[in-house]
């Protein structure tokens, strides 16, 4: 590799030989020799300026602009000496800075979009449980990340109240998008169709047009008939329905049944609407698997049996609000400092 020093030495040697030749030719040091010496000095200064000073000044200028946070330019050069190495190093470093700055800008943009999406999703679930003459509601939801796949809602129509709780497979942006789609579809059909079963079947048909079978939502929907004072349910592949019987202290464990929404084209054969017999003080507990599959530091699952035990322990003493609170506290104590891996939703409904 030819360095600046080597170039300078070669050039200096050439013109020094030229001056020496002049001395030999004229045989003495006279005015012409002085002229040759002056030319040598000027040439050396010019070489230093054009080969070293100007390129170095150009590199230093771009470095100063970069350090000052101002706009700088890439240095284009074919040199392979020390100046070329500095220019190449500058280009590599600033290229990395540009990429990092772009990544930070993209990250901030994504975070802003996630924040907005999380706010929209938050508005899809009721801020406060509704108030009805015959029923008391209490709900708790805690996503595992900014966006979650759990959802619940209370939809009050003229003759019926629809209550549903669902869980999209996975969590994050995709789950949140599917959750929003299903919530919107259910909201539309609940105002036009006559039963919970019809709503489930129609929602599944509409959803299948837009999602793959690997992206589905398990769900259970309750329907309370205001006139008949009767509660029914339709399962769509969700968790068990727990009913705490106030009079006896017993807990009914009902498999919700059905097929998850979005998994197959037609769920009309598996979507069965069945009645839930409720007496005064009885409580229905709906939940997502973020509760039963929560783990403690020993990697032990919270599990369905522990959830039932917690319901049994607090059901006799507390109303729906107290039961939801104490189950949540019991779960938090069990998990401890372990990270939350899935969305958690709990819904308690009490018959007045």
Image (cartoon, helix red, strand yellow):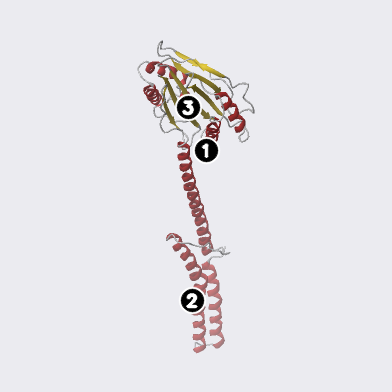
Secondary structure at badge 2 equals helix
Residues at marks 2 and 3 touching, judged by CB atoms closer than 8 Å: no
Residue 71 against residue 173 in the figure, above or below: below
Residue assigned mark 2: 45
The numbered dot on residue 173 is 1
Residue 41 in picture, x, y percent from top left: 49, 79
Secondary structure at badge 1 equals helix
Label 2 crowd bin: few (<14), some (14–19), many (20+), radius 10 Å? few
The numbered dot on residue 232 is none
Q: Nearer the viewer, residue 230 or 34?
A: 230
User: Which residue occupies 51% across, 53% down?
Assistant: 96
User: Which residue occupies 40% across, 31% down?
Assistant: 128
Image quadrant of residue 80? Answer: bottom right
Secondary structure at badge 3 equals helix
Residue assigned mark 3: 290
Q: In the rendered structure, which disc, 3 or 1, sits on the residue that comes first in sequence?
A: 1
């Amino acid at each position: 590799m030819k360095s600046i020093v080597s170039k300078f030495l070669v050039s200096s040697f050439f013109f020094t030989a030229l001056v020496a030749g002049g001395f030999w030719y004229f045989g003495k040091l006279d005015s012409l020799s002085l002229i040759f010496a002056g030319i040598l000095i000027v040439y050396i200064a010019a070489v230093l300026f054009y080969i070293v000073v100007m390129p170095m000044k150009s590199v230093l200028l771009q470095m100063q602009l970069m350090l000052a946070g101002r706009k700088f330019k890439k240095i284009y050069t074919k040199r392979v000496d020390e100046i070329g190495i500095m220019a190449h190093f500058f280009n590599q470093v600033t290229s990395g800075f540009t990429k990092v700055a772009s990544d930070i800008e993209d990250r901030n943009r994504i975070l802003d979009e996630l924040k907005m999406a999380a706010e929209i999703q938050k508005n899809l679930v009721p801020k406060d449980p509704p108030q009805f003459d015959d029923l008391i509601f209490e709900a708790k939801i805690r996503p595992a990340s900014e966006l979650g796949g759990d959802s619940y809602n209370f939809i009050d129509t003229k003759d019926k109240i629809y209550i549903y709780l669902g869980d999209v497979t996975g969590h994050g942006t995709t789950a949140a998008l599917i959750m929003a789609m299903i919530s919107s579809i259910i909201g539309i059909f609940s105002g036009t169709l006559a039963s919970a079963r019809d709503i489930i079947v129609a929602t599944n048909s509409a959803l299948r047009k837009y999602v793959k079978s690997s992206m589905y939502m398990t769900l259970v929907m309750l329907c309370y008939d205001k006139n008949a004072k009767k509660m029914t349910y339709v399962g769509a592949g969700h968790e068990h329905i727990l009913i705490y019987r106030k009079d006896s202290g017993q807990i009914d464990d009902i498999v919700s049944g059905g097929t998850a929404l979005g998994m197959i084209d037609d769920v009309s054969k598996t979507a069965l609407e069945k009645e839930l017999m409720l007496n005064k003080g009885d409580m229905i507990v709906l939940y997502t698997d973020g509760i039963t599959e929560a783990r403690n530091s020993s990697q032990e699952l919270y599990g369905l049996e522990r959830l039932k035990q917690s319901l049994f322990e607090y059901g006799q003493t507390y109303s729906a609000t107290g039961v939801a609170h104490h189950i949540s506290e019991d779960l938090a104590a069990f998990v401890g400092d372990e990270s939350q891996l899935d969305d958690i939703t709990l819904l308690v409904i009490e018959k007045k």
